[in-house]
Image (spheres, rainbow, N blue to C red):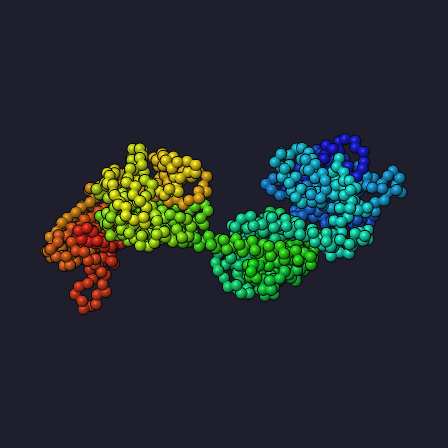
Amino acid sequence: MDRGTERDTPPGPGRVPLAVVVVDDAGLVSHWSTGARRLFGVPKDEAIDRPALDLLPVAGALPDPDDTPAPAPYDVLAEYDGHGTPLGTELGYPSSGRAWISRPDDTRADVLWWAYPLYGSGAERLLVLAADAAGLREDAPGGGDDGDAVSVERISPAFARHTEFPGADDLARRLPEILPSMSVGESARIVSQVLELGYPILEFSQNEKVPVTPDWGVSRRTERKARRERAARAVAQGLPLPGDLADDGEDLEYVAVRERLEFLNEVSGKIGTSLDLARTIVEVSRAVVPRFTDVAGTYLREQVVAGEEFDEGVPDTRTMWHRVALEHTDEPGRWDDVVPVGEAMPFPAHTPFFQCMTTGEPVLVPRINEQMGHAIASQFDKRDIRPLITGRSMLVVPLKARNVVLGFMILLRHPERTEFNDMDRVTGAELAARAGLVLDNARMYTFQEAVAETLQDSMLPHIPARMAGCDIATRYLPGAQQGRIGGDWFDAVKLPGARTAFVVGDVMGHGLNSAAKMGQLRTAIQTMAGLDLPPAQLLRNFDDLAQRLGGDYLATCLYAVYDPVAGELSIANAGHIPPVLVRADGTSELLDLPTGAPVGVGGVPFEAVRLRVEPGDRLVMCTDGLVEIRGEDIGVGLETLCESAAHPAASMDDACDTIIRALNPRGGRKDDVALLMARLNGIEPDDVAEWRFAPAPAEVRRARAAIGEQLHEWGLARLVDNAVLMVGELVTNAVLHAPGRSVTVRLVRGETLLCEVDDGGHELPTLLDARPTDEAGRGLRVVSTLAREWGASRSGAGKSVWFELTLPRR
């Protein structure tokens, strides 16, 4: 625009030179165009870094120039249209005005000005556009060289949306030209805000709108449209129809309604793009600012925010409401400390908010007076909200779905903006109805998603990072389109002899049904693992159980038992993809196992493979959802699994993440993924001690002595008393209840101190509640009280009773 003023262009509608000024956050001029130099008579070098209040007519309304002369370099005409705002309080909405200014050469100019607030990371805070009103009169329709021929009775500055006139694209292209000293990023930010808030136009008494830009005119063919739009606004605002528009009154109500419907359709397109509740809340709030309102605060019931069910009755004064969003056009941060997002509060019965939430109808307050402002502010302890709300027009609309009030929105307009009216009330109610349905859908989806996550989390085990002789890391990724639940699972089960069973399984199918079946099968395999069955026999029993549950209980499964003392791994496979063994030297291989058939098929034998492992080897087990790549053979995924599993990593978690990234780089897999990685550290022979005792009462004393001596040798003297007492009780029970069979006692020093007592009896001991007169029955009670953990299980030769003690810190 600035460059356009450099040319000698003939006057005419739409060819008006502009002065362009940018003011920074300190109130100083940071840009002063050539047009500004001509209009205000101040050179650029004298204007830059000078307080804007010394140069620009934007500080407020002053007396008419025919009255007392103003002390400032300008004064405002009685024709002033708009509300000036001192630069000390940043504008939150476009402002405009008309004023007389005094130039340094003692001449005066009739100036029309428009001010835009600017937001963002830059220092620019205000864009001011100004034009010579005298030149506008000459350029206006009917104007001419003959002073008596001027037919313009009124020149009123205003703002128009950038979609209202042809040539808006040209305006967008020319706007950066007026800011040649700024970077592309800064210019683009200012241009986007101007086009969002509306560009300056002039409204003449002939009802033409002339945009204030050079080389851009408006054809008279738009006159009819302009007249209809003015009339529609009058009807929408409940104002009498201007006399010059009386002939157009026939379809004005239709035009006004059409405008409202267009707005509602536009809003509807902006909300509900996601079923995420938090995102939907933000969409609803942003959809109405700044076009319909200047401030939009959204409140929801506490239970809605928490994703909980609630009584659908009428709210009362005890109902807590969470402020979940706040959008406004004020300067950034102005509302944050006074009404922060996330605050929860009830509302008293005397407030319009309570009236809205209990009646379910919009509440309109044309203007918040001092008394109402004080009543509302009384709810905010130690925070004065009155300066933010007093004098503003307010509309409170309920957010309802299925006749239940989920929340409400508080809409506020700046004092200089048109008050909310009855048509706004109807529009707000329709807006809230649409927003309420969208929020309710998001709420229900969020609730169901939380239920699914809780269900899945309850079904998957929380495996400790360390178990006897091994470190473990796991990952579970739900399928992208399966509601966050599925039939994949992993597990690690503690077995007698410091051994650990590793399980990975995949129920065929997806969704809730598969997850329910997975929960049953996982529980079953845990129970069978507790019986200490060999892997092949366990899968045989597991298959039988799946057949009894029903023909649709089909699952693949890997079952491995790791013995850290012997350094052995025994694995059986039921139709699952093979595991990967990564050796300590960095080499990796897919283990060649008999595939078997999925459990539930029946009639298929299972075989176990036993292999030696060394300390530092890693076992990687996963479900097929990780290695199946669309359009490629599964062998490609298995090869990638081998390569990524062998990649060096700082920790087990890092190693798991490396595998996930290699096989699922962009996420969004449709199938569930379960991954279990175990580093097989082993247990050194020096950390294991074992004795065999005869089934005689005299052997109890020998067992106690052996345990005490070994603990002293290991430097665990602090554990001697409790360990000796518990071993004595368990050996005594073995001698009494399994006579004729030898008793084996084993100590294993690992993450904890493990003690196992094995005998030939098959009846598991029971914890009894001994009476004061009973002479026996207190042995297991002693063990239960002193041990960190204890248990009993059957074995092929009899049973094993064990307990653990926490090792003292070194």
Q: Is residue 312 above or below residue 788?
A: below
Left or right, 124 with reference to 343: right
Q: Residue at x 52, y 50 (%)?
A: 275
Q: Which of 762 and 390 lies nearest the eye of the viewer?
A: 762
Tell me where residue 264 appears, x and y as whole percent.
64, 52
Task: Say which residue appears at 25% left-offset and 43% top-offset.
Answer: 607
Q: How many marks?
A: 0
Q: Position of residue 23 (x, y in %)?
A: 67, 40
Residue 233 in sight here: no
In the image, 696 versus 538, the foreground residue is 538
Camera-side residue of 140 and 244: 244
Quadrant where the N terminus sits is top right
Residue 264 shows up from this direction = yes
Quarter assignment of residue 52: top right
Q: 424 or 718, which lies in front?
A: 424
In the rendered image, the residue lying farthest to the front is 603
Q: Residue furthest top?
A: 7
Q: Is residue 486 left or right of residue 699?
A: right
Q: Identify the residue at horizontal 63%, vertical 48% (top origin).
A: 266
Q: Position of residue 385 (x, y in %)?
A: 61, 56
Residue 466 versus residue 701 in the image, above or below: above
The residue shown at (66%, 60%) is 364
Quarter holding the C terminus? top left
In the image, residue 6 sits, relative to residue 739, either above or below, namely above
Query: Residue 315 at what x, y percent from top left?
Result: 55, 64
